[in-house]
Image: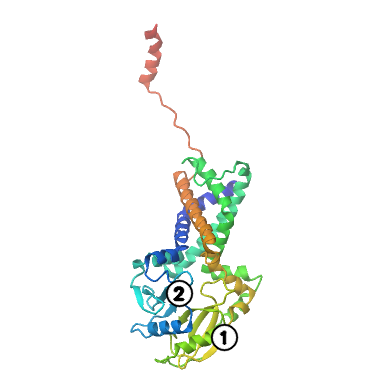
């Protein structure tokens, strides 16, 4: 138990601040749509999914001089289309008519953008993605070891949002009790976060349900070569074909071919799918808009369908406002646990009680004490 306590303390002291920042940024990102609705024109408008409106918007967007790489269409919670460009620093919001209303050339121009890049990539691309995934696994380790360390002190449990006093003993006591209280939420958040960022971890979790090779084969792209993108492509026909193939599904993301011989890809979300942008797919020949392949997300292997639940659970994209508030509490709790772990560790890395300094008597004070009785008589 002593070794476990030492390992828990040192690991928490070293990466607690990173977990605290990830928790805080995650708690803020949960409310990204609400922030945009309050600050960006047209963001609070109702979603429009009729074929005519979608086709007109897509035609306008892809006819622009600088054609975006893809368009993410408005949702029930956010009445804006999101445009992505080849340069990852660039982006734009367009209304549902396809008119660009806000654009940026650097992620630093939009708080919700750089906050996401930090939370997911730590501003370090794929390397940062791996680091946050490892941090998630470390967080899971803290939850497990924390529960073990808390068990002998379970009779002293107290429900407090903040330590009783800012002294090490009180902070440690609060840290353990808070960790136990939010442990189920932390397990969900940390597991899904690590699974999204670490492919091997995700595959290991799904392996009991579906072999990784089967999941990889099920998500493979169609081996079909398309023609050159037609300048006057009938987007109404393309979107109408997808809607006819999947009645009741939302059209979510449309991506023109990125290289010669590529296809137009379209992601759709059927009502049974939790993932906001869905994993149901349709592919079209860019030369004439003919549908050449489809993939129904509801027929994917069980392991793949479980994987598709990671993001909606992690980012609170299911369950409405109640679950968003729950995951906000989870993020703030992780912030508090990580920050106070760092404070208590670096305030006393050894973890041993600090010895009180004994008063050192000088020769003059000793002489004074000796003379005091005589003068008093």
Left-right relation of 155 to 276: right
Q: Position of residue 37 (x, y in %)?
A: 41, 66
Q: CA distance from mark 1 to mark 2?
A: 21 Å
Where is mark 2, residue-wise?
A: 74
Q: Nearer the viewer, residue 254 or 351?
A: 254
Question: In the drawing, what numbered circle is on residue 191?
Answer: none
- Residue extending furthest top? 377
Say what secondary structure mark 1 lies in: helix
Quadrant in the picture for residue 86 = bottom left
Question: Residue 218, image x and y in percent?
Answer: 60, 80
Front residue (pair 84, 350): 84
Going from N to C along the chain, the mark reached first, 1 or 2, is: 2
Residue 273 location (% of width, % of height): 57, 73
Q: Quadrant of residue 25?
A: bottom left
Q: Is residue 263 visible?
A: no
Q: Which residue is mark 1?
A: 245
**Label 1 close to label 2 by CB (< 8 Å):** no
Q: Local crowd at mark 1 within 10 Å, few (<14), some, or many (≥20)?
A: some
């Amino acid at each position: 138990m002593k070794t476990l306590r030492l390992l828990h303390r040192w690991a928490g002291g070293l990466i607690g601040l990173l977990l605290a920042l990830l928790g805080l940024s995650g708690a803020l990102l949960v409310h990204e749509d609400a922030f945009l609705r309050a600050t960006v024109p047209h963001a609070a408008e109702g979603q429009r999914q009729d074929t005519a409106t979608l086709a007109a918007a897509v035609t306008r967007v892809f006819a622009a001089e600088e054609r975006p790489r893809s368009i993410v269409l408005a949702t029930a919670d956010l009445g804006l289309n999101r445009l992505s460009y080849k340069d990852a620093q660039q982006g734009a919001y367009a209304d549902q008519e396809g008119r660009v209303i806000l654009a940026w050339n650097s992620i630093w121009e939009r708080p919700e953008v750089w906050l996401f890049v930090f939370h997911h990539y730590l501003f370090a691309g794929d390397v940062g993605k791996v680091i946050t995934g490892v941090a998630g696994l470390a967080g899971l380790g803290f939850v497990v070891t924390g529960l073990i360390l808390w068990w002998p002190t379970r009779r002293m449990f107290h429900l407090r949002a903040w330590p009783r006093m800012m002294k090490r003993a009180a902070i440690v006591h609060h840290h353990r009790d808070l960790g136990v209280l939010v442990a189920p939420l932390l397990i969900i958040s940390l597991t899904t976060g690590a699974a999204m960022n670490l492919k091997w971890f995700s595959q290991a979790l799904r392996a009991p349900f579906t072999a990784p090779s089967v999941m990889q084969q099920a998500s493979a792209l169609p081996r079909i070569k398309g023609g050159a993108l037609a300048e006057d492509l009938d987007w109404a026909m393309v979107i109408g074909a997808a809607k006819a193939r999947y009645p009741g599904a939302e059209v979510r993301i449309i991506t023109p071919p990125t290289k010669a011989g590529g296809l137009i890809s379209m992601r759709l979300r059927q009502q049974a799918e939790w993932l906001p942008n869905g994993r149901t797919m349709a592919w079209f020949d860019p030369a004439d808009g003919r549908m050449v392949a489809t993939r129904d997300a509801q027929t994917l292997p069980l392991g793949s369908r479980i994987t598709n639940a990671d993001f909606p659970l992690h980012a609170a994209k299911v369950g409405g406002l109640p679950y968003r508030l729950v995951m906000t509490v989870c993020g703030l709790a992780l912030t508090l646990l990580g920050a106070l772990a760092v404070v208590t560790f670096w305030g006393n890395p050894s973890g041993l009680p600090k010895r009180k300094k004994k008063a050192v008597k000088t020769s003059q004070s000793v002489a004074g004490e000796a003379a005091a009785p005589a003068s008093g008589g």
